[in-house]
Amino acid sequence: MNLLVTWKKVLLFGAFGAVGCLAGWLVGEPLVWASRSVAEAAGAKDAPSLISKPAPQFAEPPPLPNDFRERVEKAGGKSGDVQLSLIWYNANDLDLYCKDPNGDVVFYKNPRVLSGGELDVDANAGTTRSGLPTVLTTEPVENIYWPKGGAPAGRYQVFVV
């Protein structure tokens, strides 16, 4: 292998790389400048984001579908900033779980957590909290909610067993 030929290849490919970087910079800088101008005109503030206009936040959470709403209301369930409802169509006992952003899990054995989350409806559970037998239904519902203004910000993980 000829050392001179090898160095010529290294220098040639290095030059191609440098020209490519320069071309990218020449095209990219005006594009970034134009994007920033458009974002500022739309009211976006300085932020480490490529999104020029953030998505609007909902003042109220979207309403439940009618079949969910009817079952939750009939069972005496509550609503709030975060609401998780599960319905199914037989007399089985399904269990709804939610791990809140603090790591606490709301479920039938832990119906209330420090962050304010509560499992307030637990259908087809076998027994009530007072120990009485539950009446089985073929239109069951489970409901977990956090009161208005009380839900912690972050990621909620939901499970069904």
Image (tube, rainbow, N blue to C red):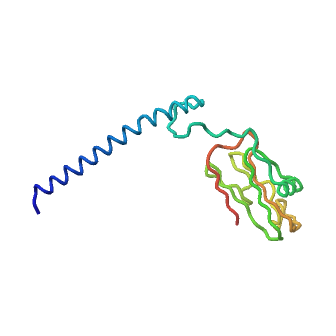
At horizontal 70% and vertical 59% (from top left) the residue drawn is: 97
Tell me residue 86's x, y (percent): 77, 60
- Residue at (72, 49) in percent of width and height: 117
Quarter of the image for residue 30 reads top left
Q: Is residue 102 left or right of residue 71?
A: left
In the image, residue 147 lies at what x, y percent?
A: 76, 43
Of residue 14 and residue 151, the one placed in the foreground of this image is: 14
Residue drawn 61% across and 38% down? 54
In the rendered image, the quadrant that contains the N terminus is bottom left
What residue appears at the point 67 percent right and 38 percent down from the top-left corner? Answer: 56
Please provide percent x and percent y for residue 70.
87, 55
- Quadrant in the rendering for residue 105: bottom right
Residue 140 lies left or right of residue 47; in this view the side is right
Q: How many marks?
A: 0
How far from the left and from the top, in percent, is residue 112?
73, 51
Task: Please state, as top left, top right, bottom left or bottom right, where the C terminus lies in the image.
Answer: bottom right
Q: Residue 94 lies in what quarter of the image?
A: bottom right
